[in-house]
Image (spheres, rainbow, N blue to C red):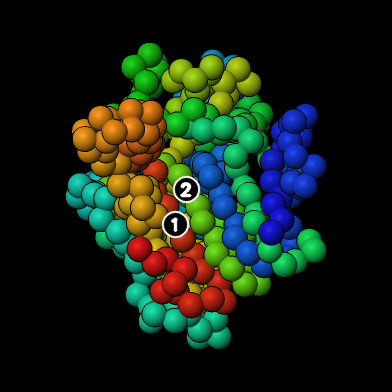
């Protein structure tokens, strides 16, 4: 088994030599592609719903002040119509990401007969994309809101916690209108990544939301030194936004021609045997050290499955050229 890390940052000095470090996803992959908080780093535009439809949000790259720009183009309008319905016409229902979403498919994936999914119902900066390959040899800034002066924003991974609107962010003339984060570029990035797998499994882990529960005010925010700050694109903080995971999943399934599985991190980890249960108190009497270790492990699992924290992640699993059932077995 060989490991390849995909990351723009310089290679860590203490990284084992047997791990390959590269800035680009390998062209051909046979194995597992793991994207941990990568999709929320992919550039996107923000739109605001006005009286005459969706318009781009412009942002001053120095102050972060926002203004309303031109109407969105046809491609972005099509994405918004499909994946981010306006609350003016379609109220968003509460979304429960703890209930697994699996696209329709047979148990076995036939890569020659396509099955795609219809619209349904912070971390280490070096942990973006990881490819586990057991057999093969082998630009722009973050436009979360379009810069009014033509500069770009860059997002990077941040310490894990769900983003929430920041109280210090200045109010704008359109702050009472519905915002949407156009995920079309993320769909394309995921589809490209999945398309590089000849046989294996693509896994994306990220904070996200589904069509039935899009956040009315969006999720755009900034992080600096592990603390949440206003998303000012001046290069002093990481700017990021949650992922429309069902849209991304549909794009990947169209390329893989195989069904996907979309579940909460809690469900995914429990399926792997991490239940977070406390060890029996009787263990403390016969093996005190073992009890302490088991208690620490249970605490770690509780943190990873807490829906208000790291448990807010969604896990997207996309088989490619392999049977669907075993790849997403619970």
Q: Which mark is residue 205?
A: 2
Horizontal side of residue 31 vs 50, given as left or right: right
Residue 146 shows in the view: no
Q: Residue at x 59, y 60 (%)?
A: 32
Residue 198 higher or lower than 144, as above or below: below
Mark 2 element type: strand
Residue 183 shows in the view: yes
Horizontal side of residue 260 vs 98, given as left or right: right
Where is the C terminus found, in terms of image quarters?
bottom left
Give x and y (percent) for residue 191: 57, 62
Q: Which mark is residue 67?
A: none
Between residue 93 and residue 56, name the one nearer to us.
Answer: 93
Mark 1 highlights which residue?
A: 316
Horizontal side of residue 34 vs 83, given as left or right: right
Give x and y (percent) for residue 87: 25, 46
> In the picture, residue 165 is in which quadrant?
top left
> In the picture, residue 321 is in which quadrant?
bottom right
Q: Residue at x 39, y 67 (%)?
A: 329
- Total number of numbered discs in the rendering: 2
């Amino acid at each position: 088994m060989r490991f390849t890390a995909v990351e723009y940052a310089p290679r860590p000095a203490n990284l084992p030599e047997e791990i390959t470090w590269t800035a680009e996803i390998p062209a051909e992959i046979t194995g597992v592609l793991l994207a941990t908080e990568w999709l929320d780093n992919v550039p996107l535009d923000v739109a605001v719903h006005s009286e005459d439809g969706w318009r781009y949000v412009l942002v001053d790259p120095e102050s972060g002040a926002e203004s309303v720009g031109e109407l969105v183009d046809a491609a972005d309008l099509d994405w918004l119509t499909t994946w981010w319905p306006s609350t003016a016409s379609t109220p968003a229902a509460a979304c429960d990401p703890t209930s697994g979403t699996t696209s329709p498919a047979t148990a076995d994936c036939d890569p020659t007969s396509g099955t795609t999914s219809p619209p349904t119902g912070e971390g280490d900066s070096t942990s973006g994309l990881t490819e586990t390959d057991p057999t093969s040899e082998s630009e722009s800034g973050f436009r979360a809101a379009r810069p009014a002066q033509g500069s770009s924003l860059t997002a990077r991974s941040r310490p894990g916690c769900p983003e929430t609107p920041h109280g210090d962010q200045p109010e704008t003339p359109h702050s009472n209108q519905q915002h949407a984060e156009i995920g079309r570029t993320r769909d394309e990035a995921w589809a490209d990544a999945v398309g590089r797998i000849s046989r294996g499994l693509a896994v994306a882990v990220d904070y996200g939301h589904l069509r039935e529960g899009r956040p009315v005010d969006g999720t755009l925010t900034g992080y600096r030194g592990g603390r949440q700050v206003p998303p000012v694109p001046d290069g002093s903080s990481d700017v990021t936004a949650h992922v429309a995971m069902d849209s991304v999943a549909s794009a990947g399934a169209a390329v893989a021609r195989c069904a996907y599985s979309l579940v909460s991190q809690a469900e995914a980890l429990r399926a792997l045997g991490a239940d977070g249960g406390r060890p029996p108190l009787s263990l403390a009497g016969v093996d005190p050290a073992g009890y302490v270790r088991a208690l620490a492990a249970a605490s770690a699992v509780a943190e990873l499955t807490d829906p208000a924290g790291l448990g807010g992640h969604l896990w997207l699993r996309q088989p490619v050229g392999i049977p669907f059932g075993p790849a997403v077995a619970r």
